Image (cartoon, rainbow, N blue to C red):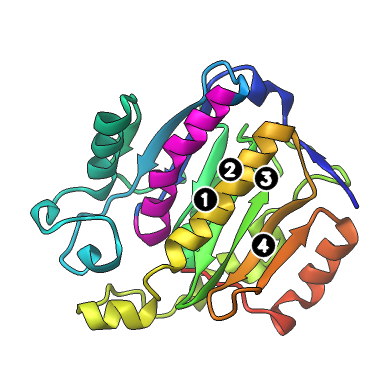
Amino acid sequence: METHHIHPELLKHRVRALVVGCGGNGSAIAAGLPYLHQALLAYGHPEGLHVTLLDPDVISPTNCVRQPFSQSEIGLYKSIVLANRLNMFWGLDWKGIPERLDTKRRLDGVDIVIGCVDTRKARAAIAKCVEDWSEVDYWLDLGNNADSGQFILGEPLNRRNRRQRLRLRTVSELFPEAIQGDLDEDDLPSCSAVEALERQEPFVNPTLASHALALLARLFRYGTIFHHGAFVSLSSLSSVQALRVDPKYWRRLRTKGFRNRSIHTN
């Protein structure tokens, strides 16, 4: 089985993470990141994490059904509410920015991008920002439907990540349709609590986020991983299919992935 080794510089300085999207998956990831921060410090990491939360959306009544927001927060920016909440509870200095990802600006000073977006167009914007002249180390992408989803940790092809056999392929490389914006369906927000719960089971987001954060924790603790993602289903307790670090497996996914498995974009 092939092995991926963590970028050694990430063990020497504060790890700068950018979470793009603060909805179902993004808010679940945000809630878990302080635990990862504390774990890194306990493992002997010099500074742990610094997190920036990016999302232009404000909290709606429907968001209060399956996202960690309250009625008193309706109308406030998701990113700022989450950042303030985490900072107050944990004594952190993390940031919330109520903006959309700007594809015309370079992602300077970012080591890990965690994509929690709900459209292919938004995922394509992340791909554009982390590739080419970027120096982002990793792109962790999460996507889900009603009761299943996937998370994929990749090394975008850029100034820092050169072409090599074991470079972790990103979601856009393994599943090109994941960034084809013309395939996006109606992405209007749910207009009722019932519709919101019909679109997604209540616990799909925290389940997916926990698996993704556990992967990062293992990478930082042991410095190596043998899998860089997984497909997760809530409909079966045993349904977790790991994504191996394996160039041959990647090629099979690239050529036949969408005929055999549908990747989730929400």
Q: Are marks 1 and 4 in contact (CB under 8 Å)?
A: no
Q: Which mark is residue 126?
A: 1
Give 202 or 5, whichever is nearer the viewer.
202
Q: Within the image, what quadrant is residue 256 found in?
A: bottom right
Q: Position of residue 217 (x, y in %)?
A: 61, 39
Contact between labelled residues 3 and 1, with CB atoms less than 8 Å apart = no
Viewer-proximal residue among 247 and 255? 247
**SS of the residue under disc 2:** helix
Residue 166 visible within the image: yes
- Which residue carries the number 4 mark? 230
Distance between mark 1 and mark 3 Cα atoms? 10 Å
Q: Main secondary structure of the magenta part?
A: helix
Identify the amino acid type marked 1: Ile
Where is residue 54 drawn, in percent x and y? 36, 44
Q: As shown in the figure, which amino acid type bears the numbered disc 2?
A: Val
Query: Is label 3 in contact with label 2 (beta carbons under 8 Å)?
Result: yes
